[in-house]
Image (tube, helix red, strand yellow):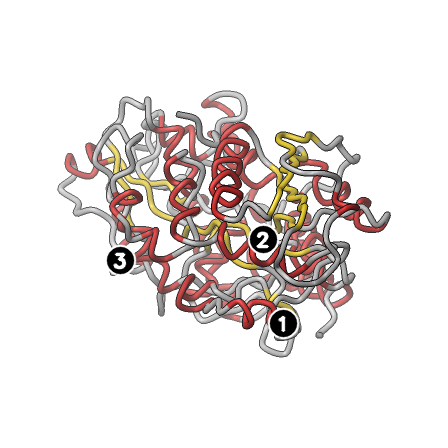
Amino acid sequence: MTMDSSRLSRRGFLGMGLAAGVITLTACGSDNDKASSSGDATAANLVMTVWGGESDKTAYQKRIDLLVKKFPELKVTLQLIPNDGYAQKVQTMIAGGKGPDIMQVAESVNVYSSKNQIQPLDELASKAGIDLEKRFGSIGKLYSYQDKVYAIPDRSGAMIVFYNKTLFAAKGIKAPSADWTWDDALSAFKELTVPGKQWGYAGSGWWAQWWSFVYQNGGKIIDDSGKPAVATDEVIEALQWAGDLIFKHGVVPTQKQYADMGADVGGDAAFANGKVAVNTTGFWGISGLTKSKIDWDIAPLWKGKQQAVTAFGSGLAVSRTAKNPAAALKAIDFLTSPEAQQQIIATGQDVPANIEVQKSEAFLKPAWMTKPVNMNVFGDSSGFVYRAPFIPQWNEMQKAFDDGLADFWLGKQDARTSLTAIQKRLETIVKPA
């Protein structure tokens, strides 16, 4: 069984490097140019564009096969674009009038919607009878911009806690839970740390990790009016807590200590090797542990003043150049239904966005799992996923954080100084809608 093996391969689609060639994996119909232009959901030849690797190729194709078996009038060609060239390649295709009918999107969804490269789906979804909240819970309208929905959730799993059961048992510490507070987490990390040899926690230098703490603390990256709000006390306190775990408490490895563990070793590998007792990451972390010698399990993320956690995933959107939007939406409707979404977990690809599937026996006890794992954690966590600000300036915002926090993560600058400077930079980048 194959799964995505690293965060890089799982999230690398945000790259905006040189356009890579499109790999056509399966052609089940004629050219998109010959698709029906009637505007209804009758016969149509559709092109669906995604990023990813072998596990994605397998999972998407199995779902497409189910789709065309149920609706023979829909023919679908699946195209795979390498992660690091996806955004530029798709935008070039759309600009040239040769864009896909259906396209995979994620955090950069509103880079596309703000340029009118994908279509709003509210009216089409309403006509199709798709209840986004019922089908997907709190993430139903995650891929929205200016009160319009631009993509239907397809894959979505909360960030979770991986913990070393042996190390916890040796210290008599109960398993992590959603009821843990920041103080509870810090106390456990201290108990689990052996200076210079073993650390309690892998750290939270990635936006998805420390942003969770921000929203737990009552803060927001972008406020309700659409303005940056990273220099607020709530955000500063959350980031400083994450930094203090490294430089004040010594329960997280420094960058040098990680480098000493080996080339390209980060939290996922350090946890698999038993160097850290707790790691926070996504579903894909499971694939790196199937052959690990440590005894591990998963748990929900702890809370601050309130519960909040980042969700990872992607949605399916309809391109501006789609010849038959209704038919494309009909395909998306089926692909996000329980029948089709079962294939996401059957192939070990990801967490299905469909809540019904997350609660199914097939998800809770997948055939490929080599040990008992508390897969209920994903469903339990879905209720406190916060809505991340997927603004049109997503890529520029992330670069501002990467640049502005470089010295902070080296222990050379405090959170207030770093975030005050980042706030000023974001104010020149992010304009309220």
Q: Say which quarter of the image contains residue 88.
A: top right
Q: Quadrant of the C terminus?
A: bottom right
Mark 3: secondary structure: loop
Measured along the vertical axis of the image, is residue 7 above or below residue 94?
Answer: above
Residue 164 to residue 431: above or below: above
Badge 1 marks a residue whose secondary structure is strand
Based on the displayed image, in which of its 4 quarters is residue 72 positioned?
Answer: top right
Amino acid under disc 3: Trp
**Upstream in sequence: badge 3 or badge 1:** 1
Judge whether residue 57 can be spotted in this image: yes
Q: Which residue carries the number 1 mark?
A: 148
Quadrant of the rendering where the N terminus is positioned? top left
Dot 2 amino acid type? Leu
Q: Which mark is residue 316?
A: 2
Q: Disc 3 or 2, which lies upstream in sequence? A: 3
Q: Nearest to the eye among marks 3 and 1: give it.
A: 1
Tell me the CA gap for discs 3 and 2: 35 Å
